Amino acid sequence: MNQFLARSVMRRLVNSGSNCKRCISSLSSPLSLSSSAATAAAEVHKPSSESVVMMSGKRLGFSGQWWRMMSSASEPPTKKSTSSSTTVRKEDEKGEKTSDASVEKMERKNDQVVVSSYWGVSRPKITREDGSVWPWNCFMPWETYQADLSIDLSKHHVPKAFLDKVAYWTVKLLRIPTDLLFKKKYGCRAMMLETVAGVPGMVGGMLLHLRSLRKFEQSGGWIKALLEEAENERMHLMTMVELVQPKWYERLLVLAVQGVFFNFYFVLYVLSPKLGHRIVGYLEEEAIHSYTLYLNDIDRGEIENIPAPAIAIDYWRLPKDATLKHVITVIRADEAHHRDVNHFASDIHYQGKKLQEAAAPVGYH
Ligand SMILES: [Fe+2]
Ligand SMILES: [Fe+2]
């Protein structure tokens, strides 16, 4: 029985290998693929003894085959096969003179990836304005910005309508367990809350995207605006996680909270986007309040004003000697912008209109 299974697996692998080769040869002629590229592609799909061993449940040879599949190169990362990319990296390393640990970590990760030119997606050399190499893959220089610190932090939407009061008191109630859990551990609190803050923009953007497809209508830029908000919140989290390393039970809590909050907000946004945006507006008001308390503790010296993480310096175009206080100040300004966007979105719904009828605040940070 085992022999029969092994033979059948071998036959399938040989057949799939020849099918793949057929696909490649049919593609190579109209697209005029170079022979080396075609060879490299064929090598990716070539059934080898390693893959047979892998398919029969043994791990021997797995890493070699997997590496070839992921890199789409015909050889494992030897010095010879990666000479061009190594040269580029060496040039990059000469220009890079930063001692920041996170930048170095990012560079080490990049160095482990051998760039393949076969798919034509290798990243061009990107530099900062001062000519040093751009170390981030998670965001690009054209996505960075200087936070608008002139925004009014004290603005508040007074709840008058019934749903506004529901939103307001829901957020006030949610604050109680948060205060009890984190007390004055503002770094920890911010990190945890940013994992939640990135959800509404993504849910709203996704549902508007699906609506646009379903109804054959434009979104008025609101899909982009909400997804931008989600991305901005995620960058807050990526920054906070550089400052506060989450413990295992905090990671567990994030899993539980995300599972509950995503589903809650999804259903809420389907039923009443008006209430959804209003709740987020009030959550942002609370975030401004929390970050203000965080800043007060930094000013009083109760929290050490450590140097800003490198990711924050590049994302918000902060000075090189920026500190934690700079970072929290720009994050708080972002939260104030999110507050305005979400209260604005809720107001549009209150007027009985669709979001696309008003100009979407794209790029509003
Ligand atoms: Fe945030
Ligand atoms: Fe926010």
Image (cartoon, rainbow, N blue to C red):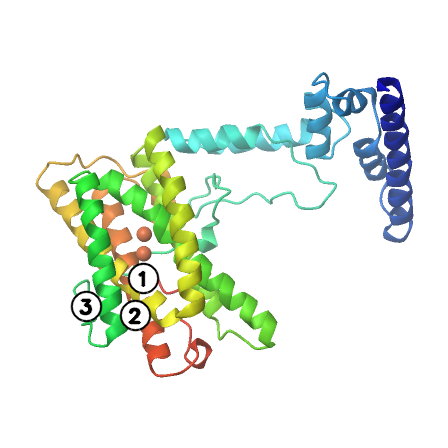
Query: What residue is shown with label 2?
Result: 343
Task: Determine the CA span between mark 2 and mark 1.
Answer: 8 Å
Where is 195 relative to 269, above or below?
above
Residue that sits furthest to the top in the current view: 60
Task: Determine the residue positioned at 60% across, 33% down.
Answer: 88
Q: Position of residue 220 (x, y in %)?
A: 49, 75
Task: Determine the residue positioned at 77% across, 25% down.
Answer: 55
The mark that comes first in sequence, 2 or 1, is 1
Q: Position of residue 85 (x, y in %)?
A: 64, 32
For badge 2, the amino acid type reads His
* Quarter of the figure that contains the C terminus: bottom left
Please rate how many residues cluster around mark 3, counting C-alpha atoms within 10 Å: few if below 14, some from 14 to 19, many from 20.
few
Query: What residue is shown with label 3?
Result: 156
For badge 3, the amino acid type reads His
Please rate how many residues cluster around mark 1, counting C-alpha atoms within 10 Å: few if below 14, some from 14 to 19, many from 20.
many
Q: Is mark 1 within 8 Å of ligand 2?
A: yes
Where is 99 relative to 258, above or below?
above
In the foreground, 102 or 83: 102
In the foreground, 32 or 87: 32
For badge 1, the amino acid type reads Val
Label number found at residue 280: 1
Instruction: Tell whether 9 sits left or right of 346.
Output: right
The mark that comes first in sequence, 2 or 3, is 3
Label number found at residue 94: none
In the foreground, 194 or 131: 194
Instruction: Tell whether 168 sits left or right of 68.
Output: left
